Amino acid sequence: MQLADRMSRLGTETAFEVLARAKQLEAEGRHIIHLEIGEPDFDTPQHIIDAACEALNSGWTHYGPSAGDPELRQVAAAHISKSRGMPCEADEVVIVPGAKPIIYWGITAVVNAGDEVIYPNPGFPIFESMINFVGAKPVPIPLREENEFRLDVEELASLVTDKTSMIIINSPQNPTGGVLTKEDLAASAEVALANDLMVMSDEPYEQVLYEGTHHSIAALDGMKERTILLDCLSKTFAMTGWRLGYGVMNKELAAQIAKLQTNCTSCVTSFVQRAGIAALTGPMGPSEAMVAEFKRRRDVIVDGLNEIPGISCLRPHGAFYVFPNITGTGIDSRTLEGKCLEEADVAVLSGTAFGEYGEGYLRMCYANSVENIQIALQRLGGLLGG
């Protein structure tokens, strides 16, 4: 079969490949500790499940508007207005299945073939994949450990050319847990404004923050009209399998993104959107308790990793990942990923799964019990001579 050329430019997420291998080993009787897949290990709060069941029993089983349930769009706009400190209207919101469609459709809508897009590296691999897929050139902005995995704004400015059309930022960040400061965002906004660039701001971990306050570049002066903000309910409300997210952008672009949804998925599942209303308007207690537990686990895994020979690990400020430096082991990232799984029964990801600047690191997701994290640390210590 002859595939279209564009398929050769499409990337993937290594996490799902490692997960598949880990599941195969489990089927053979091995006890695998899963630190590879990035999702909360908590169940969706009951009031959200109840809202979905009530919607199903009330006939919410039909097509809806491509841009989303009008009530959910209004609720999401109110949530953004409050959480990001900026005015937001319902016609600036498009409801989509998860957050990834906004990455794909947002890039598709505003980036031409031959354009350049600056994106974080190490970073979420779908950024680079989608840039390549539309025929644009991915330009990595390195995130370095010595800068707490924040971008260097002077370096960002130096990467801009007359072909640059978009900057992508992600805070709190996957895979490093790094968080951009308000000053970082203000300086990045200056670069965007000075060069007439669009910004895609990936913010699904906005509520998973352990210190400080979340800031969005979209809320800064002059940035709302040129920012595509994406968020989802997957992380904050433990709703990864529900596939519910949204994008916030100027209303003209929102209409075009809704048109892309018409062409691709028609609309998001109707009863799932009713559950989304319950999530965004309901009690935040379960989410706050989850984040508090993640913070406890963060401290356990960081302290434990720093006791293993050859490993050093920063304490991340957000998300639920650590990105330990493993250069002291003398083993490259991909090889150590394999050894951790095959020899120590611990599933982790190579830093290079998130780009070339991830070499020398592993990504570990601590959305697992403290007991399992401690077992993983013991196994890794044994593997590396600790």
Image (cartoon, grey):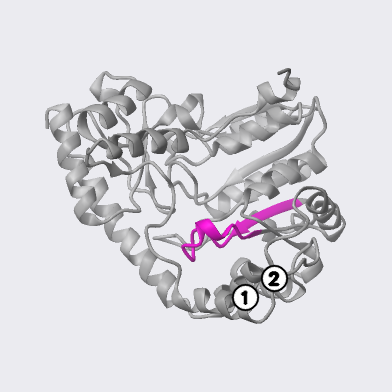
Residue closer to the observer: 300 or 87 = 300
Question: Residue 9: in sight, yes or no?
Answer: yes
Residue behind mark 2? 61
> What is the magenta range?
227-245
| Residue 230 horizontal side relative to residue 373, left or right | right
Residue behind mark 1? 56
Give residue 301's position: percent from left, percent from top. 25, 48
Question: Residue 189: in sight, yes or no?
Answer: no
Tell me the tag on residue 250.
none
Give residue 323's position: percent from left, percent from top. 37, 39
User: Pointer 1 and pointer 2: residues touching (CB < 8 Å)?
Assistant: yes
- Residue type at tag 2: Thr
Residue closer to the observer: 195 or 307 = 307
Question: Few, some or many C-alpha atoms within 10 Å of disc 1 (few <14, some 14-19, many ≥20)?
Answer: some
| Residue 256 horizontal side relative to residue 291, left or right | right
Question: Few, some or many C-alpha atoms within 10 Å of disc 2 (few <14, some 14-19, many ≥20)?
Answer: few
The vertical placement of 148 against 279, above or below, is above
Q: Is residue 235 magenta?
A: yes
- The residue depicted at 52 percent of the width and 52 percent of the height is 181
Place residue 136 in its image quadrant.
top right
Give residue 23's position: percent from left, percent from top. 35, 39
**SS of the residue under disc 1:** helix
**SS of the residue under disc 2:** loop
Quote the CA–CA distance across marks 1 and 2. Answer: 6 Å
Q: Is residue 52 magenta?
A: no
Tally of marks: 2
